[in-house]
Image (tube, rainbow, N blue to C red):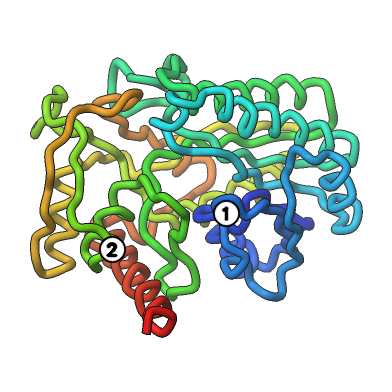
Amino acid sequence: MNKVPVLVTGGAGYIGSHAVLALEDAGWPVAVIDDLSNGSREAVPPDVPFYEGNIADRALVERILGEQRTQAIMHFAGSIVVPESVEHPLKYYANNTLASHALISAAVAAGVKHILFSSTAATYGAPERVPIDEDDPKIPINPYGASKLMTERMLEDAAAAHPFNYGALRYFNVAGADPEGRAGQRGKGATHLIKIACEAAVGKRGHIAVYGTDYPTRDGTCIRDYIHVSDLAEAHVAALGWLVEHPAENLVMNCGYGKGLSVLEVLDAVDKANGSPLERIMEGRRAGDPPELVAGNARLTSTLGWRPKFADIDIIVGDALRWERKLLERMAPAAS
């Protein structure tokens, strides 16, 4: 396979930094652009060219694409918090849709051949059935999902008019950390359940809030399909390889394990890994949260031959908790 130079947008963030590691491990030439609004410079390996900036800065992006002779883009940059998108929708359309328009425009002008986009299960909204297949209706119920779906449509239309192909990976709930401890979730103002629970487990939070206990699910709490971030990163590398080998075809697929866990079941796993129970406070529902999201992943496994290595909630939670403890140890000298 021809391992072409790749620019990773948002490569200092949670999922992007794991994708950078997976690309490097597989021998792909990599560069990163990130504005560090929610990422960390430390998350990017020192041997990877790094550019601090926003993907909406088309002149900067075009310069990077030229300097790195980029032929492929993995696009992770954007805003990702569902409740925030309901409160600040214009921010999401600016950071996700408009910024992606600038990026795609720069890529077309520079002759980039492949774009792999970080999409989301939020494009489906509140599905009528689970598991969700890729061809099921896309009716987002929050601006986050809508902004991502708009970018998918831009890529579809642009790829029909210009000489590049694209992939859109719609993933579900991403969690865990690199099993070797090289990367994990550092983001400011974490909102992901497992991250927050692990912060509570190491004493950074006094309790864990459960938002909604009256959903039509087996225990009244939301059900999600949790995928280990390193499995997801490997799926991105496999998808990029597929795009390179099939330059006349596009790729849209779900990324998940095809099984769901409730909020309470996840918290039970965190309690088990921590060796003691967390304090749980029951709250009302959050705006924009569908009751159940579970991936139909047959297309992923059949097309890419992808097989997960870490598809166990105890592994996911264990890696996340080890990472959280590592972060706490790094903070200790500064506190003392």
Can you say whether 71 is above or below 124 in the image? below
Residue 331 x %, y % = 41, 76
Q: Tag on residue 204?
A: 2
What residue sits 11% from the left and 69% below the top?
A: 275
For image coordinates 65% across by 41% down, the residue present is: 116
Q: Which residue occupies 33% across, 19% down?
A: 127
Name the residue tied to disc 1: 16
Residue 210 placement, left or right of 194: left
332 relative to 162 in the view: left or right: left
Alpha carbon of mark 1 to alpha carbon of mark 2: how far? Answer: 25 Å
Which part of the image, by quadrant, shows the C terminus?
Answer: bottom left
Secondary element at image label 2: loop
Q: Residue 114: name its quadrant.
A: top right
- Please give the name of the residue rendered at 65% of the width and 43% of the height, measured from the top-left corner: 75
Among the two numbered marks 1 and 2 on one chain, the one whose residue lies closer to the N terminus: 1
Q: Tell me if residue 3 comes above or below residue 97 in the rendering.
A: below
User: Horizontal and vertical percent for residue 136?
Assistant: 42, 18
